[in-house]
Amino acid sequence: MRTPVVADSTETPRQKWSKAAMIAVWLVFLGGAVRDLWSGDYSHRTVALAATGLAAFLAVYCSLVFRHTRRPLPQRLVYSMLAVLFALALALSMSMSQEWLVLFVYISVASGAVLPVRFAIPAVVVCVLAMALVGTDFGELPWWNEWTSFVIPSLLGGFALMSARQTVRTMRELRQARAAVAQLAANEERLRLARDLHDLLGHSLSVITLKSELAGRMLPAHPERAAEQVADIERVSRQALVDVREAVSDYRRPTLAVELAGARTALDSAGIAADLPQEPPAVRPEPEQEGALAWALREAVTNVVRHSGAARCTVTLDASREGSLALTVTDDGKGPSGAGEGNGLSGLRERLALVDGALSTSAGVEGGFTLRATVPSVP
């Protein structure tokens, strides 16, 4: 059975540095153990051995958490590394002061990050019990000694990492599901185009073939009638060309469902928190109006990703009583540049005007930028 992981196997350099920084931040809690190491209460040999053990503990811990959460390690290696961490923590905490009991907190966190839930929970409990036994000198000291301050961090750290792993796994499955929905929508469009081309060209090409054969037979004896057939061939072929252009134009028209899925993927890839509708509204506009609205969503999200520097983007689709559908895209970025509309917004305004729609832009109430596109809709 495959051990669950916290992150995807493919990470960007930014994600790797962020994870490394997060791991490094938590290492500050080893300050008490480091101070105890250099307190002068131990011999040089003891300090050397303890420093070596601490270095080995950190190397194994960082390798396990960073490497396994990027790409799963073999289970036997994971369990072996956890066993090494436990043995080092036990030896160091029994040989040194109670400051070293903090090592069990790191084992609890590592267990929550790399073990399945059914194994992680017992591992966290074992860490707390081992900490209690060492902290009370195996029952000879009162239980309310200094070690009790590590219990809550150990429990919270282990269970928090279990929850984070489950959350990330769910988010990964959602991203895969959204990508599948977008792919299904694209496949449906391809099937529609194939059906349209078959229906349009099948009949037209059959007529052209028959009339071509007929004109060929008429040419020697009846050139006038052959010319009539050639004229019919020209008329049918021109009409077929018009039908194909209309079909291709409709095929290229984007839809709100596909653009919403694409917008979510683009914002997630850019590290921007996305607040988008799960599905298009029940009130649907005509295909031309929906296409213009979908172009507006694509242009707005592209501007947010490229130019805004935003941390969050919100998209809403609202139907009014007057029979219109409004798309609003808001971000919390740096707002309008003051250089006027670019070609993208100008072209978008013209596209909306062709379907009796309207476009408005403004600075956000608390900074950022707001784009609002409105088109007529039908029930």
Image (tube, rainbow, N blue to C red):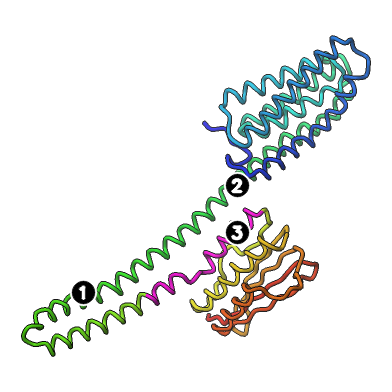
Amino acid found under the numbered disc labelled 1 = Ser
Left or right: 222 with respect to 139? left
Left or right: 230 with respect to 309? left
Q: CA distance from mark 3 to mark 1?
A: 45 Å
Residue drawn at (68%, 73%), measured in percent from left and top?
371
Q: Quadrant of residue 33?
A: top right
Marks 1, 2: nearer the viewer: 1
Residue drawn at (65%, 31%), measured in percent from left and top?
120
- Disc ID at residue 206: 1
Amino acid found under the numbered disc labelled 3 = Arg
Would residue 266 be counted in the magenta stretch?
Answer: yes
Pick the front one: 112 or 199: 199
Answer with mark 3 or mark 2, whichever residue precedes in sequence. Answer: 2
- Disc ID at residue 346: none
Q: Which residues are magenta?
A: 245-270
Q: CA distance from mark 1 to mark 2?
A: 53 Å
Question: Compared to 188, does 244 lie above or below?
Answer: below
Answer with mark 3 or mark 1, whichever residue precedes in sequence. Answer: 1
Query: In the rendered image, which residue does mark 3 sit on?
Result: 264
Marks 3, 1: nearer the viewer: 1
